[in-house]
Amino acid sequence: MSRQPRPVRVALGERSYDIHIAAGALDHAGALLRPHLRGKALVVADATVARLHGGRLAAALAAAGIAATVATFPAGEPSKTVATAETMWRACAEARIGRDDAVIGFGGGVSGDLAGFVAACWMRGVAFAQIPTTLLAMVDSSVGGKTGVNSAAGKNLVGAFKQPVAVVIDPALVASMDRREYRAGLAEVLKYGVINDPAFLAWQEAHAEALEAGEPAAVAHAVAESCRIKAWYVGEDETEQGVRAHLNYGHTFGHALERHTGYRTYLHGEAVGIGMRMAAVLAGRLGLLDDDGLARRQDALLARYRLPAEHAGSPTTVPALVAACGLDKKVAGGRMRFVLPRRTGTVETVAVDDAEAVAAAFAAAIRA
Ligand code: GLY
């Protein structure tokens, strides 16, 4: 492992934990997790990640004396169900995972969310650790304890807050990612600069091409800064009663677009990128956004990260999206909460009932 930088701390009192970030950290995962695990572990991984990186993780855990069993499921969002969780609970039973043992989530957001939910419920809660392998999971879903599965009622509506005992991030693993999926993760990296940290936004402007190309030092820095910022929000507001909701910048618009396109057209980060553009337009329309160039800088970085800038729709797309938000004329007094930028590095949650402004924001990034 290259020089071990100081871990990022998530400060949650007795449930505080470290995020270890270093190229090569996967080979030291056992040593890094050993102080936090009392017994054996069930590794929950999708089949692709297990095939690509499972051997290295198994060797690292064995070298630290951690007995581990790997339980796999088919890669992809359709696996994020209570049925897959049930399969994993059966694997817990077969591996005799008890109160002193642990579940390790290994892979992208689906593995982490599923493994955390499995850990939160098995024996009413066993220890849980996260080893994310995708950029999105490294900078977002592996940190902060949101876990769960999708259900007929909707995405992520069934779940638990289950903080890990530690997170081990090897940013070098992004080299094996699908390029489009990697770029989609960059939308969340951009988000942190926009909502919280003008210096990080300026760093991204100076390193956008290196980051888009996956240059290791740039990726490691971006992951560490993103985790530092996310850790602050989680430490302030673990269960999203207030400021943590700012992490949902771009997500209200993005989720509407994902739902509208049946989750088939966009990766999550791509929809969030388009949603961030829409959020900046809405803030401008409502007179909330200082004229400090934020919208232009955000657009420029989205382009440099080669993320889609607009959705190809039809004349009915905007009204359908506004209606999906509950803001059309048929819904009297409809209001929707959006996270909107005030200036670079500052956002706030705003209740909006101005359907025309929301329509204009959608329209700004929809080509009919
Ligand atoms: N992904 C947003 C959050 O963890 O709060």
Image (cartoon, rainbow, N blue to C red):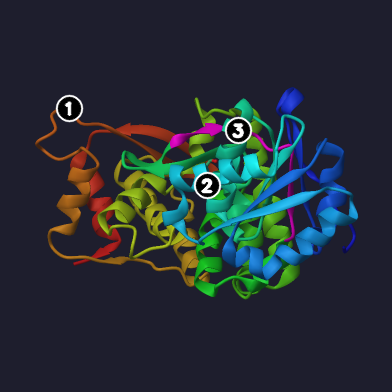
Which of the two labelled residues, at mark 2 and mark 3, occupies the earlier sequence position? 2
Q: Residue furthest front?
A: 94
Element at label 2: helix
Q: Is mark 3 within 8 Å of ligand 1?
A: no
Q: Residue furthest left?
A: 330
Task: List the residue tagged with mark 1.
Answer: 333
| Label disc, if present, on residue 87 of the rendered structure | 2
What is the spatial separation of the Cα atoms under label 2 and label 3, in whole angstroms? 12 Å
Few, some or many residues within 10 Å of mark 1 (<14, 14–19, 20+): few
> Where does residue 30 sit, x and y in percent of width and height?
84, 51
The foreground one among 230 and 290 is 230
Element at label 3: helix
Identity of the residue drawn at 42% across and 34% down: 349
Task: List the residue tagged with mark 3.
Answer: 122
What is the spatial separation of the Cα atoms under label 1 and label 3, in whole angstroms? 43 Å
The foreground one among 138 and 120 is 120
| Label disc, if present, on residue 218 of the rendered structure | none
Q: Is mark 2 within 8 Å of ligand 1?
A: no
> Where does residue 133 sit, x and y in percent of width and height?
65, 60
The foreground one among 272 and 70 is 70
Identity of the residue drawn at 45% across and 42% down: 82
- Asked whether residue 290 appears in the rendered view, the answer is no
Q: Along the horizontal axis of the image, is 236 left or right of 280?
A: right
Q: What residue type is disc 2 on?
A: Thr
> Which range is magenta?
158-170
Which of the two labelled residues, at mark 1 and mark 3, occupies the earlier sequence position? 3
Identity of the residue drawn at 36% across and 44% down: 252
